Amino acid sequence: MLIMDQVSMRYPATGGGAGDVLALDRLSFRVEQGEFIVIIGPSGCGKTSLLEVIGGFRRATGGRIEIDGEEINGPHQDIGVVFQEDSTFPWLSAEQNIEFSLKHRGVPASDRPTRTAEMVRLVGLDGFEKHRPSQLSGGMRQRVALGRALAPQPKLLLMDEPFGALDEQSRLGLGDELLRVWRATGCTIVFITHSLSEAAMLADRVVVLAARPGRVLDIIPNPAGAGRSSERIGTPEFSEMTAVLWNLLKSQVKCGKRDA
Amino acid sequence: MMGYSTKVVATRTLLFVAAAAALEIVPRVGVGTQLEIIPFSEMLHGVWAITSSGELWPHLGTSLLSIGSAFLTATVLGVAIGYALWRLPRIYAAVSPYLVSYYAIPIFAFYPILVVMFGANRIPIYLLAAGWAVVAVVVSTVEGLAHLRQSWEKVADTYHLSWWDRALSVHLPAAWPQIAMGMRLAATYSILGVIASEFILSGEGLGHMVNHHYNSFTFREMWGGIVTVFAVGITLDVLVRRMTRGLESER
Amino acid sequence: MSRSATVAGGTFSPGRTAGLLAVPALTLVLWVVLAWLLPYAVATPEDAIRAILHGIDRGWMTKELATTMTATLISSVLSTVLGVGFAILVALNRFWGDVFEPVLVWLYSVPKIVLYPIVLMIFGLSLSASVGFGVINSVLPVAFLVFGVIRRVPAVLLKVAQSFGLSRWATFREVVVPLAAPTIFTAARLAFCLSFLAVVVAEMLGSRQGLGQELFKAIALNDIARIFGIAFVLSAIAVSINALFLIVQRLLFDRR
């Protein structure tokens, strides 16, 4: 349902010495309905640019991005975004944060309380819905951000290293939660990360990007089934997956260091 | 294609030039004359008039001396008091609502009391300006110290630093950005305190000089004095910023 | 264990109230001591209060106070509106924000009291002169403060708004304003503080009305009881209104 067709992103020279920067170079891949895609790559592979163009914050300088046949040229109403940094509104409670998205996606006021309550339950914020973000931990705040993005039932959920700022155990726990939510809602997820184990744990398929400029290096299917969870950590298949990914990325990381 | 920062600086310069041009043209066209606003070039001529006649220098010197001493006093005392209050949080909690209202209190009302106590000399002016500026430094110091990270404190513990060493090498440097901001405010208030006191009740200094020309209807010289005060204000602010930025980059 | 000192928040407890009363109590003690030591310079609290009551009785205290407070109110409102308005307009645009930032800082550091003659000439010795002077002295710090907070809105929150398709105006209304609201409230308090002071100074310098003018007359006559009476009234007002602002601020914004 998401089609990346020869997508390129070029940033004009800023006068700091270097010329134009090509962040993405003719990226092409497809994401099917209901898939959980993880995008992984070394530093500088254009992951931020990817988020910007799929999220519609910037227009790609080349190529085309389509979601269900419609071209993306601005923040699309069927795409929800979860950012890496804390993006909760500090002056609103958890449930008010979630309701914010319903309000701005045109959900009538009468429907909002029920849908908000449903979402609170779905992302595991029961009992904390009236709390302010300052009273919640980092992990809880990301649950709020997730709830807010999911509440309007978007077709695509775009997540930019959402657990990157958390400790590893929280990451694993939230990863499991995310898989549960994904199975419950059936929405399509594009998840960007640095982490090999996150990719191996969460993905249906992993899109591996090359270093600057970002190109699709390979797309690796995950042998893990739909019932996967953090319990797979340590299993031979899991280790194989991370090994395959690392093999691909290893050369890119060295590459990046030389260029930098 | 101009770089972004060049464009910013160019626009700012253009704005200043436009303002100066307006100040030059508008009075000449006759709009400002009822208001005694003279053309910008005349103002500069006024500066020339007071410098060449030698009138400016003693007043400038007097004011600068008072401003400088008030500023230094306010800074040193302010940091010391601020540090002490930080170490005594209960006292700070009791005092802080009043510190917050400090700058609304018309401290000039106490100027005559100081004159009676210390005589009609520069001391009341110095005391008033220093007393006015010090609170800005106190508040900035406490706020800066409030950002002290526990980890830095622990590092100091591992070196068994005495409280004095600790204050100088960990606490104050950590609070430096806020203290620097407080110092810039102290410079402003020192200037304000000195010039305003001279304006109201003094026989010398820049404030007095401006007031004198105003009362004598010699507006060109008055504007010259005003422009000088502006220049002093800006120069001092730039100086303090230079000074504090230099030390900050050592971190 | 925290060594940091912060403005103590929370409910009013007997301990806290005692603490807050400590400063006025100590000030009173200091006042009495100074009055005893320097009877020709410092009036006793008794005499000061007597002078205040005399002023109320004769009418000048209430009348001039009303004048001063009117000028202060008008100046505060004008400064807040102008300062906040300007800051919002300029800060939301990155380019103009960058252009104006140092200008605001420089203007801020210039002693504006020297503009008082100009203000007098524009407005004459009227209420408007006090208001004008009040605005000149307070509008820049207000603008500066609000400018800073708007410029520092976290980019990620703006992105969230963008991802939901909010228009610029809606983003401003639903993200920037709630985030900046506490600071805008502080700016209003600052507008009051600086306006009040500037108005009193303007009145001292030549206006024909206001409590500042009464203070100046008392200084000229060396009527120390009246000097202290007026100074006390002005200080008490400054502190009380600030306290009011702080209480309202805590009620409105403390749940963050």
Image (cartoon, rainbow, N blue to C red):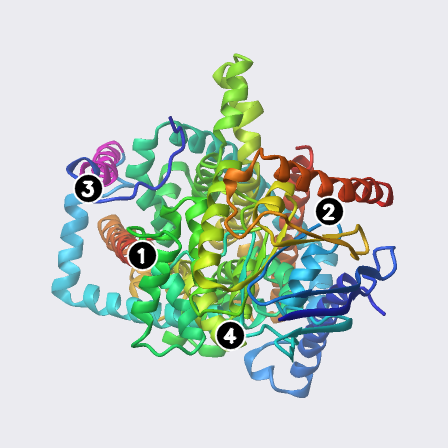
Q: Mark 4 belongs to which amino acid?
A: Leu
Q: What residue sits right under mark 4 in the picture?
A: C166
B133 relative to C66, above or below: above
> Mark 2–mark 1 contact, CB under 8 Å?
no
Residue in the image at 47% along x and 44% along y: B133
Residue C26 magenta: yes
Query: Does residue B65 appear left or right of residue A23 in this picture?
Result: left
- Mark 2 burial class by Cα count in 10 Å: few <14, some 14-19, many 20+: some
Q: CA distance from mark 2 to mark 3?
A: 73 Å
Task: Name the mark on residue A43.
Answer: 2
Query: Does residue B154 appear left or right of residue A224 in this picture?
Result: left
Q: Which numbered disc flags the more N-terminal residue, 4 or 3?
A: 3
Residue B43 magenta: no
Mark 3 or 1: in front is: 1
Q: Which residues are magenta?
A: C17-37
Q: Quadrant of residue A188?
A: bottom right
